[in-house]
Amino acid sequence: MNNITQLGKSCCGCSGCEQICPKNCISMKPDSEGFLYPEVDESICIECGICIKHCPILTDVSRCNIPKVYAAKYKDRGSTFKSTSGGLFIPIAKSVLSMGGVVFGCAYDENLVAKHIKVETEDGLYRLQS
């Protein structure tokens, strides 16, 4: 049997195997404590081994490429202090709006209930800060 079930209880529950399976024969099922583990429908599994190749527990990390890291800093300190994201949300949102896009985010309504809203102009961006 060449599939993810050979992992046993060492599974981290990431669901990567379920997502990558070309036959959709893997589903994540909770155990008696509620932790998710892969369950394979053997009747449709083709034993391709893709689930094993993509498992972070069964995969040798040294074969993976080192991920690139990007960093940015917004120099407008006023916006930085108004934003929980450190201010980077504002320049990114302004860029999206300038290209004709729409920005979505969470804001409180008049009853202080959090709602997802859309903002189509820079004037409305303040509602998505803090």
Image (cartoon, grey):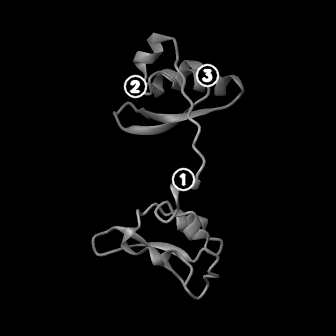
Quadrant of the snapshot with the N terminus: bottom right
Q: Nearer the viewer, residue 130 or 52?
A: 52
Give the mark, 2 or 3, whose residue is nearer the N terminus: 3
Find out whether the residues at labels 1 and 3 contact each other: C-beta distance under 8 Å. Answer: no
Q: Residue sitting at 64 percent across and 82 percent down?
A: 46
Query: Gap in Å between the C-alphas at discs 2 and 3?
Result: 17 Å
Q: Secondary structure at mark 1?
A: helix
Q: Residue sitting at 61 percent across and 22 percent down?
A: 94
Q: Nearer the viewer, residue 65 or 84?
A: 65
Q: Quadrant of residue 72?
A: top right
Give the mark, 1 or 2, whose residue is nearer the N terminus: 1
Q: Residues within 10 Å of mark 2 (few under 14, many from 20)?
A: few
Q: Measured along the vertical axis of the image, is residue 40 above or below residue 122?
A: below
Image location (x, y in percent) of residue 98: 69, 22
**Does residue 83 appear left or right of residue 67 in this picture?**
left
Give the mark, 1 or 3, whose residue is nearer the N terminus: 1
Q: Measured along the vertical axis of the image, is residue 65 above or below residue 57?
A: above
Judging by the rendered image, the residue that carries numbered circle 3 is 94
Q: Label 2 sits on what residue type? A: Ser
Q: Label 3 sits on what residue type? A: Lys
Image location (x, y in percent) of residue 75: 52, 12
Quadrant of the snapshot with the C terminus: top left
**Disc marking residue 62:** 1
Q: Quadrant of residue 32?
A: bottom left
Q: Residues within 10 Å of mark 1 (few under 14, many from 20)?
A: few
Find out whether the residues at labels 2 and 3 contact each other: C-beta distance under 8 Å. Answer: no
Image location (x, y in percent) of residue 77: 45, 11
Residue furthest toward the front?
62
